[in-house]
Image (cartoon, rainbow, N blue to C red):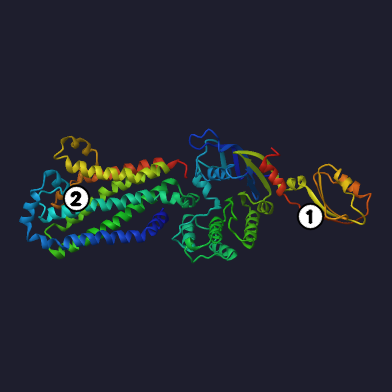
Amino acid sequence: MIALIRWGLWQKRWSTLWWAIGISAYMILVIAVYPSFSSQTSTLNNSLNQLPATVKSLISDSGNYMSPVGYMSSKAYYIMLPIVFSVLSIGLGNSLLARDEQDHTLELVLSRPVSRLKVILGRAISGILIMLAVMLTTALTTIFIAWLVGLHIGLINLFLATAMSARLALIFGALAFMLSAFGKTARKASVGIATLLLIAGYLFTSLSGTVRWLQWPAKLLPYNYYHPSEILNGNANWNNAFGMILVVIILGVIAYLGFRKRDIS
Amino acid sequence: MHDAPTVELLDLSKRYGRSTNLALNQVSLKVFKGEVYGFLGANGAGKSTTIRTLLNFIQPSGGSATILGYDIVAQSVEVKRHIGYLSGEFAAYGGMTGSQFLKYMAELQPPKHKNTQNELAHMFDAELDKPIIELSKGNRQKIGIIQAFMHEPDVLILDEPTSGLDPLRQESFYKLVRSSCQRGASVFVSSHNFTEVQRMCDRVGFIREGKLVAEKTLADMANQAAHTFNLTFKDEAPIHQLRQINHTEVTSIDSRHVTISIQGELTPLFKVLANYHVLRLEQQEVNLEEEFLRFYKGSNA
């Protein structure tokens, strides 16, 4: 299985590098411009507070937009980072198994003494390691720039917020992976369904404060359990974190059950 | 005469999805140690379905099959320890070079001898340093051949194996198959190419619309095939008398030279020839193509 993981990573080496560079560059930009805003915190906060509650809830989960935590939440951790990580994760989930199947290279692997369990585990671990590499690069870059700029947020909190953001994205990637493991038809729908759940989760969770009836469906969506401001303030909810990891594991098991005995197209 | 079969299919069937037709309809056959079994049929007849089922890429809908005694479904991983597989549309990871790809395959299934891969690369003059995506179909197929043979498998499952190869490399491939059989390997090969089948196979099975319609040894087919003779007479050729012989086809080249194809016993031909002054009699090489085509088209069903 080591060979499967190693060659899986090798195939994605350049895209992984560019994803890591791209997301890190975004974080550098966001943090680097913060000192320019910090001198006008109260003015900007007053302006933003005049926005309707619905709009405010779509921007951030923090009320104070120009505090270090509020700024990082609104500019990176609440929307941008989870979405960008999710695009990477869904793309990986959709392609890790499905592209090999489309290219008929999966047959070459399966013609060797390798069980389908090992194939799916190898692919899943490759995907997780790629996410981990991009997340670590982003987190370390963020911590370094935050330290350089003197952003008043605990560096461990920044690391955790980045990790939790990637972990949220991992759920959508795992969903795409699970669907693509079931075959051609499910594979075609996998990106759409995973993206729909991501966007719906963001909208339902953001708006559930003002639109009451959205509270119940929001509870079914992963975004509801992602609170970057709390993490940045050092109040990470570890139950949510482990719950999401459990969901990823369950999706992985379902992926195996779908792939175990199905026809390879 | 034979040991236990290395490949055995017993009423193997496959139905795709909700289709009412069986893509594979109760196919039973056996392949023995050291034998090259050719699997022939038109497009969509069920050749690739059979191969994909044997490799457990697709699940059988009925029946069973074993390779070296291992069940192809329940013991699929064990089966694959002993087989080499090559597809006619060999697909490899485009971004890898041939060497990288073969290294990957060797990590998944270590070769018995370190030198085998290099020997095969030399035999086929394979370009291992170029990215596979830049290689022509024939050069990609060479890498496919190397990966299928490099671990010296006991059973080779080959689907249109010489697709894209030039005649010189086809010749090398036939030699490789023969030498594999000599060390005891069994070969199950699907092909459209009659010449290839004639060159490689000991026995052939014909599949039509998912059913195995006939199995023949190449020797039997040669005996049943029409024999063609070029005849030169001293005087005018007795075309009328020759045409009266059953199962013959006579082509007159000129008044003294005749080509005659005769199926079955040759005695009636020689009885006619005994009455004439024959200067020269040449037999053409037996061509099984006509015989193959008869099975393809269904006249022997």
Residue found at the far front of this picture: B254
**Percent of width and height locating residue B35:** 66, 49
Q: How far apart are marks 2 and 1 (CA)?
A: 82 Å
**Percent of width and height locating residue A252:** 35, 44
Contact, mark 2 vs mark 1 (Cβ under 8 Å): no
Disc 2 chain ID: A
Disc 1 chain ID: B
Whether residue A66 can be seen here = yes
Seen in the picture, residue B4 relative to B230 is either above or below; the reply is: above
Seen in the picture, residue A160 relative to A53 is either above or below; the reply is: below
Q: Which mark is residue A78?
A: 2
**Percent of width and height locating residue A227:** 17, 47
Q: Is residue A63 left or right of residue A86?
A: left
Seen in the picture, residue B268 relative to B167 is either above or below; the reply is: above
Q: Is residue A81 left or right of residue B301?
A: left
Residue at 52%, 49% in the rendered image: B80
Which corner quadrant of the image does residue B118 belong to? bottom right
Q: Is residue B77 left or right of residue A38?
A: right
Same chain, marks 2 and 1? no
Q: Mark 1 points at which residue?
A: B284
Amino acid tagged 1: Gln
**Percent of width and height locating residue B260:** 82, 50
Q: For mark 1, give the secondary structure.
A: loop
Q: For mark 2, give the secondary structure.
A: loop
Which corner quadrant of the image does residue B9 belong to? top right
Q: Callout 2: 10 Å neighbours few (<14), some, many (20+)?
A: many
Closer to the camera in the image, B292 or A262: B292
Amino acid tagged 2: Tyr
